């Protein structure tokens, strides 16, 4: 039978219950914040090791308890009564004051209410503790009984419990056993917890080790450091693995002035090359955290920054600001020790310091990106030759432009597009001595270069060159389906989207083309003179050209053989219907019908018969085009254009080189 510890007199939680009710039993917002308070207690107890362990149910696998064990100095029966169970006990007003008795560490605790943090995640807490060569002590705190005591306005008496199975009691130390866990915290007790907890401290070392489920908490930002391309440092940060960017490390002043006081700050603020580098399922890494006495004081001081520039999405940092918690100055930490009173001069000075450093970082990053952006762009020989051909002022603008392009977090294909259009806009504006318009574009508005470029008619030939290349890609896709019987639908859709397939001169229509509509549905008002057959006639595609010509396109299945008489009979109803519509609307305009077929007409058996058939159709404003001829003619027309103009414009060669890079 287990031995029950027998206290000489009952234990008493020495606190005005109205104060406890005011503070609340849900003081802390997250499990890492709670556990960091318990680790801080171990630090203050001169522990050299803390073990945190999650115990799970053998049946369900769900967490059922959390154990926190330290090998610190422990507590005597009197310490437990007068210090631990006295809420608000001022740790720093003791004989040792600001430092721990053994290792002379700076004490983290101050308000004496951190012990309440455990109630945020558990309803029951068992405490086992002993001094070296002293008697063990073990008690249980029960949230439900505390609430009953508050309700009944009576003292709460923690109950003594059996201590023989405690881990720590073979030596000095303290063990907390948290169980009857709150349901809302169970989901956060997973493998991510170790990483999140590790980032709340900077005190892990050979002299103070924290273990989570037997694994050391030494993760912090180790996987991020190699991704940092530029960093500002404050004080001695030689212990951090920032050597990967030592050419881009900038030492800054670590002094913060508050009236007549000079305070020191330590740490770093870094920039990663891509915002995706800060995406972490374990934590929000796009932040500058502030540690005080080695423990998280402010999770993200970026939250109060007035600078919302795009570059802030690439920032990560960690600053140590012990001056926020000097023992001889006012305690400005909030009750939950997760923030500070915003009106205090020290906090204001820290915020102003960060704002100033962010402005400096923004300027220096722009310079750095101009350098690296130019290096990246000029890797392409044609771009490098173009850049070298610029004058001094032109190079300065181009460098700023390259810098902005390579600051935007986009995929390589999109970046190529930005680079091409920026060079095109550069060429146009340089002719007008307006390069400053381009240099003044912000990083956020850089993509407006594409819109700007679309309005520049002085380089229309280059733009048309790009259009032509795109059209050849469409033609290439179409040619793969030319033998299929589904070519009718494919051609129909592509012609609807790309009228230029019929003739390069048919680039524009004055109205949106209509697709597969009956005459009745295609017009807002149908002429009263139309026959029922004419109203039901289904037009494959109809549109109006800028010249005023009205075009009707009829597509036949690739496998069907037809005669010219068949075509004339079929399209006559379309022609008559449209003609009547135009006459009634008193609208002028020639009408042409284009029939696209897969096989030659029946009459096209000889050259002479073919000519006669074509002339007969032409007389009725009907033109017949074979699917194969349509694609081949378009391909030849655009390929000839590219061949003729390939040496005409050096910019075209640069654009092609960018695409091929």
Image (spheres, rainbow, N blue to C red):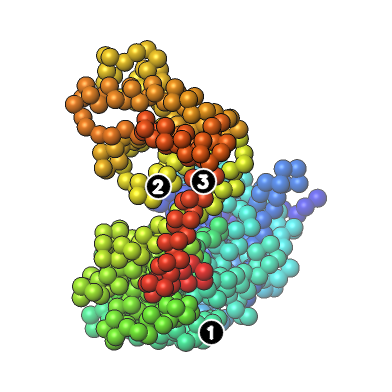
Q: Secondary structure at mark 2?
A: loop
Which residue corresponds to mark 3? 629
Q: Position of residue 637 (x, y in %)?
A: 44, 55
Q: Is residue 136 left or right of residue 592?
A: right
Residue drawn 25% across the image and 34% down it = 589
Q: Which residue is mark 2?
A: 503
In whole angstroms, how far apart are the C-alphas of marks 3 and 1?
64 Å
Q: Earlier in the sequence, mark 2 or mark 1?
A: 1
CB-based contact (under 8 Å), mark 3 and mark 1:
no
Name the foreground residue: 564 vs 532: 564
Q: Position of residue 253 (x, y in %)?
A: 35, 86
Between label 2 and label 1, give the one nearer the viewer: 2
How would you rate the neighbour count of disc 3 (Cα within 10 Å): few for under 14, some for 14-19, many for 20 or more? few
Residue 133 showing in the rendered view? yes
The disc, 3 or 1, on the residue closer to the chain's N-terminal end is 1
Q: In the drawing, does residue 437 fall left or right of residue 203?
A: left
Say which quarter of the image contains residue 438: bottom left
The residue at 42%/32% (across/down) is: 617
- Observer able to see residue 314: no
- Which residue in the protein does label 1 denote? 243
Return the residue nearer the eye: 383 or 158.
383
Q: Is residue 221 above or below residue 494?
A: below
Q: Earlier in the sequence, mark 3 or mark 2?
A: 2
C-alpha distance separating marks 2 and 1: 62 Å
């Amino acid at each position: 039978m287990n031995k029950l510890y027998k206290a000489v007199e009952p234990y008493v939680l020495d606190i005005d219950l109205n104060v406890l009710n005011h503070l609340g039993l849900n003081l802390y917002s997250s499990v890492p914040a709670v556990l960091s308070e318990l680790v801080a207690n171990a630090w203050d107890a001169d522990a050299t090791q803390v073990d945190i362990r999650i115990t799970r149910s053998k049946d369900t696998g769900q967490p059922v308890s959390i154990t926190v064990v330290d090998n610190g100095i422990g507590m005597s029966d009197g310490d437990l009564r007068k210090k631990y169970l006295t809420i608000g006990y001022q740790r720093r007003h003791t004989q040792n004051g600001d430092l721990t008795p053994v290792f002379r560490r700076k004490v983290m605790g101050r308000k004496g209410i951190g012990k309440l943090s455990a109630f945020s995640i558990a309803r029951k807490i068992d405490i086992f503790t002993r001094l070296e060569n002293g008697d063990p002590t073990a008690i249980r705190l029960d949230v439900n009984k505390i609430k009953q005591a508050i309700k009944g306005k009576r003292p709460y008496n923690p109950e003594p419990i059996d201590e023989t199975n405690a881990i720590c009691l073979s030596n000095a130390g303290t063990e907390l056993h948290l169980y009857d866990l709150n349901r809302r915290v169970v989901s956060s007790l997973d493998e991510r917890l170790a990483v999140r907890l590790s980032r709340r401290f900077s005190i892990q070392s050979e002299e103070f080790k924290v273990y989570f489920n037997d694994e050391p908490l030494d993760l912090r930002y180790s996987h991020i450091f190699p991704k940092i391309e530029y960093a500002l440092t404050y004080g001695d940060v030689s212990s951090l693995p920032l050597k990967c960017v030592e050419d881009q490390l900038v030492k800054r002043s670590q002094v913060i002035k508050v009236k007549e006081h000079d305070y020191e700050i330590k740490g770093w603020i870094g920039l990663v090359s891509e915002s995706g580098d800060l995406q972490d399922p374990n934590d929000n890494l796009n932040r500058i955290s502030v540690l005080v006495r080695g423990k998280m004081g402010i999770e993200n001081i970026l939250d109060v920054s007035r600078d919302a520039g795009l570059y802030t999405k690439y920032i990560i940092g960690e600053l140590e600001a012990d001056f926020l918690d000097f023992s001889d100055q006012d305690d400005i930490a909030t009750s939950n020790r997760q923030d500070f009173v915003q009106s205090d001069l020290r906090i204001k000075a820290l915020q102003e310091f960060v704002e100033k450093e962010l402005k400096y970082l923004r300027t220096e990053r722009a310079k750095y990106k101009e350098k690296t952006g130019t290096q990246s762009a000029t890797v392409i020989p044609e771009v490098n030759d173009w850049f070298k051909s610029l004058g001094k002022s032109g190079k300065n603008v181009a460098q700023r432009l390259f810098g902005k392009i390579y600051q935007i977090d986009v995929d390589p294909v999109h970046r190529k597009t930005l680079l091409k259009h920026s060079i095109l806009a550069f060429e146009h504006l340089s002719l007008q001595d307006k390069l400053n318009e381009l240099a003044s574009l912000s990083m956020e508005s850089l993509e407006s270069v594409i819109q700007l470029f679309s309005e520049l008619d002085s380089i229309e030939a280059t733009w048309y060159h790009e259009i032509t290349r795109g059209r050849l890609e469409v033609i290439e896709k179409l040619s793969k389906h030319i033998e299929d019987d589904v070519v009718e639908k494919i051609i129909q859709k592509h012609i609807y989207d790309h009228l230029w397939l019929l003739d390069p001169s048919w680039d524009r229509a004055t109205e949106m083309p209509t697709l597969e509509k009956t005459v009745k549905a295609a017009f807002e008002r149908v002429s009263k003179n139309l026959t029922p057959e004419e109203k039901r006639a289904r037009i494959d595609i109809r549109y109006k050209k800028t010249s005023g010509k009205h075009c009707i396109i009829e597509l036949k299945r690739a496998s069907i053989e037809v005669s010219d008489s068949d075509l004339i009979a079929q399209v006559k109803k379309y022609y008559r219907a449209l003609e009547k519509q135009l006459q009634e609307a008193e609208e002028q305009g020639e009408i042409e019908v284009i029939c696209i077929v897969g096989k030659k007409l029946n009459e096209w058996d000889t050259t002479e018969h073919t000519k006669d058939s074509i002339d007969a159709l032409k007389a009725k404003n009907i033109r017949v085009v074979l699917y194969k001829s349509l694609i081949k003619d378009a391909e030849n027309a655009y390929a000839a254009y590219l061949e003729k103009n390939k040496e005409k414009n050096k910019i075209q060669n640069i654009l092609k080189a960018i695409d091929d890079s």
